[in-house]
Amino acid sequence: MLGCADLLACPECGQDLTARDRSLRCARGHSFDIARQGYVSLLTGAATKMTGDTPEMLDARAAFQGVGHFAPIAGALARTMASVPVRTPDSAPAAAVLEIGAGTGYYLAAILDARPEARGLALDVSKAAARRAARAHPRAGSVLADAWRGLPVRDGVMDAVVAVFAPRNAAEIARVLTPEGRFVVVTPTSRHLAELIAPLGMVSVDAAKEDRLAESLGERFELLDRNRVEYSMNLTHTDIANVAGMGPSAHHAAAERAERITALPEVSAVTASVTVSVYRRH
């Protein structure tokens, strides 16, 4: 966490934060302790209205990611990030990548493995996620914050911002990017997990999601590249329980899900389908 302190701004007053012992402080005296789990909470003021992932959702996500079902998505993201211009290792400060809604830190870790000259910052509104992300990679720091309230990040310090199945605050993302920075967004298509939606009562993806994304970003960003990643996964009952329990469908028909899963074949072919879009500021 201390290695990323120069990227952060005070959520109270906007002043730069600096590391002192096990805390981050600004010139006006606001101080934020680094938790023993390795993350720092920059969530201040009234309780956030955002609902973060629960520990159970994160356990399910880590289990599903851990057996490699989303590895092709992580690989595509890492390859996309390989073409993103970042500052060279001898520049000061070192290149930086921010992931919003980082969850377990799985995708940020894949990016940092592909870009050894960069460091990462994982941001999530869930305390359980912030704890997990703090352990995701040696070159990553973890911050507990609500992106919709504003990013506790200094102006123009991020070479890239990444959002994988996560909310996007376009104005704040544009503010924290360097002039040549890139915003990389991974969104599910209407085919994503389509075979499970009806049997398990899961939340479906709107077919117009990509169009709405472009419209929401159009005022501040221009689209540079867009690629689809689609493949079939062979999922066991355990895998299906995890993929259903790790996202927005975790809160829908949960009591009936176990019974519905047992009615499925022992192994089911399920489609993974996402779009990876790359934007830069106007």
Image (tube, helix red, strand yellow):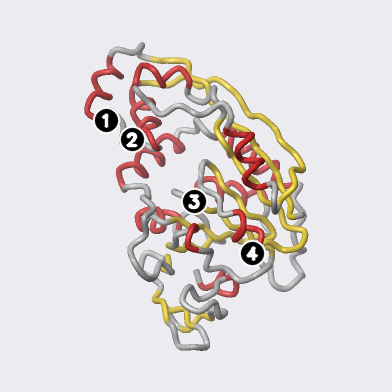
Disc 2 target residue: 250
Q: CA distance from mark 4 to mark 2?
A: 32 Å
Contact flag, marks 1 and 2 (Cβ < 8 Å): yes
Left or right, residue 103 beside residue 96 = left
The first of marks 4 and 2 along the sequence is 4
Disc 3 target residue: 102
The number of callouts visible is 4
- Mark number, residue 254: 1
Q: CA distance from mark 2 to mark 3?
A: 18 Å
Disc 4 target residue: 176
Could you tell me residue 212's position as x and y percent? 60, 37
Callout 2 amino acid: Ala
Callout 4 amino acid: Val
Asked which quadrant contains residue 56, the reply is top left
Which residue does the image show at 56% across and 26% down from the upper left? 207
Contact flag, marks 3 and 4 (Cβ < 8 Å): no
Contact flag, marks 2 and 3 (Cβ < 8 Å): no
For this rendering, which residue is in front, 78 or 99? 99
The first of marks 3 and 1 along the sequence is 3
- Mark number, residue 227: none
- Helix, strand or loop status at disc 4: helix
